[in-house]
Image (cartoon, rainbow, N blue to C red):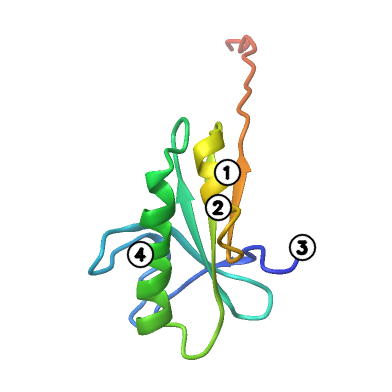
Amino acid sequence: MCGDPSAIYLSHDGRDGVEFQTDVGPIDILALDDVGNFVVLELKLGRGPDATLGQILRYMGWVKKHLANGKDVRGIIVASEIPTKLRYAVSQVPSVRVMEYELSFSVRPVALC
């Protein structure tokens, strides 16, 4: 899908986009899409509070000012649940998307020598 992250950002000084430090806080993941536009990902361990929108917009504004050089900046909030309040807030910001994750795992015995 257009605008989806396709590569982790790598700065000119060799810093990668994982926990990317900025003047306004660390960006969880800073990535580039397939045409070089920036994608800011904000990852939440559980539910995403509606305050997350302000947080990601702050990061996006910083990227736009300091790194984008005319490129677009989009944001994606990823949480285990996107509450109604956050859905309403994000519905008014076309450059931000929300996604829910689901985790599952299984275990199996390991044969010893």
Residue type beneath disc 1: Arg
Image quadrant for the C terminus? top right
Res. 90 mark: 2
Instruction: Check disc 2 and report its element: helix, strand or loop.
Output: helix
Residue 81 point in image, percent of width and height? 56, 32
- Alpha carbon separation for disc pair 1 and 3: 20 Å
Can you tell which mark lies on residue 58?
4
Q: Do the residues labelled 2 and 1 touch (CB within 8 Å)?
A: yes
Rendered position, 27 above or below 16: above
Local crowd size for mark 1, using a 10 Å CA cut-off: few (<14), some (14–19), many (≥20): some
Tell me the amino acid under the disc marked 2.
Val
Determine crowd level at label 4: few under 14, some 14-19, many 20+ residues with C-alpha closer than 10 A: some
Whether pointer 4 and pointer 1 mark residues with C-beta atoms closer than 8 Å, the reply is no
**Eye-nearest disc, 1 or 3:** 1
For label 3, the residue is: 1
Helix, strand or loop under label 3: loop
Question: Which is nearer the eye, 101 or 8?
Answer: 101
Query: Which residue is under mark 1?
Result: 87
Q: Distance between the residues labelled 2 and 3?
A: 19 Å
Q: Distance between the residues labelled 4 and 3?
A: 24 Å
Q: How far apart are marks 4 and 1 (CA)?
A: 18 Å
Q: Residue at x 43, y 79 (%)?
A: 64
In this view, the residue in front, 8 or 62, is: 62
Where the N terminus falls, by quadrant? bottom right
**Can residue 82 be seen in this snapshot?**
no
Q: Earlier in the sequence, mark 2 or mark 3?
A: 3
Q: Which residue is drawn at 28% across and 64% down?
A: 21
Q: What residue type is labelled 4?
A: Arg
